[in-house]
Image (cartoon, rainbow, N blue to C red):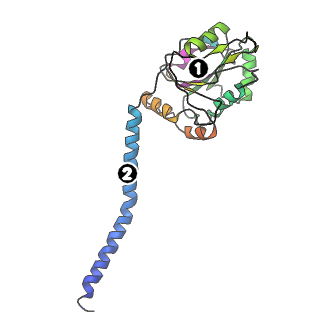
Amino acid sequence: MNATSIPVQRGTYRNALAWKATLILIPFVTAGLLLWLRHVEVRALAQRSVSSYGTVPHFQLVNQEGQPFDSAQLAGKIWIADFIYTTCPGPCPMISTRMSELQKPLEKTDVHLISFSVDPEKDTPEVLRGYAEKLRAEPKRWDFLTGPKSAIYDLSHNGFKLAVSDGSGEAGIPVHSTRLVLVDRRGEIRGYYETHAKGDFLQARDFQSLSMFDGRNVIAGFEQACLRAGVKPGHTATEQLHV
């Protein structure tokens, strides 16, 4: 071996070590970068404000089990509301299907589902119980409410700012909004979402922002629902009626 080959071998050895070190460090650097990006995302979500469209007024109705249901039972919970009726020939089955699809991804959260009947004279607790069974509604998560028509219509119109009609017009059937409504733990309305068009489901970031604000994680598995079902977000001013 001549003297010139020794420096060459040392240089090759050093290059090999450098490549090995680089290969070892790449996963750690990547993980660190991902953690940093996650931290940035969390901070951004924590600072992001979710719009408020007013507070849901207090209400007392009856659920599908014939038990009194007071809105105070929803205090401290995030919940989603809709307006339907069991004999609806139009969008109600689709609306209720959208709600039903939320049960699985939200099963490990305390998010509650509420369906108000806009035909309470026909939708007795017994009728609503049968409707709930067809949808495989979880009794402790999803309540179907009935009661005085005037109370429900006032809640829809003045509370949720959603248009509603009792069917006294030419159509002869109740007319109501097809939107789902997101309500936070303080009873404030945070979003309106369309159910009749394919698109993004309830905004996952809205849930995530609310969960951070309230100190709980309610987003687990929610992205799956976003892929399965289509609901367009439709936020508008509080004073407007949402048809």
Which is nearer the eye, 105 or 116? 116
> Which residue bears the numbered disc 2?
33
Q: Position of residue 35 (x, y in %)?
A: 39, 47
Quarter of the image for the C terminus: give it.
Answer: top right
The amino acid on which the numbered mark 2 sits, given as a three-letter code, is Leu
What label sits on residue 18 in the rendered view? none
Crowding around mark 2 (Cα neighbors within 10 Å: few <14, some 14 to 19, many 20+) is: few
Q: Is residue 92 above or below residue 119?
A: below
Mark 1 residue element: loop
Q: Position of residue 201 (x, y in %)?
A: 58, 34
Quarter of the image for the N terminus: give it.
Answer: bottom left
> Which residue bears the numbered disc 1?
242
User: In the visual, does 72 lie left or right of 149?
Assistant: left
The amino acid on which the numbered mark 1 sits, given as a three-letter code, is His
**What segment is highlighted magenta in the picture?**
63-90
**Residue located at (42% from left, 35% from top):** 45
- The part of the image, by quadrant, that contains residue 67 is top right
Q: Is residue 194 above or below residue 147?
A: below
Which is nearer the eye, 237 or 225? 237
Mark 2 residue element: helix
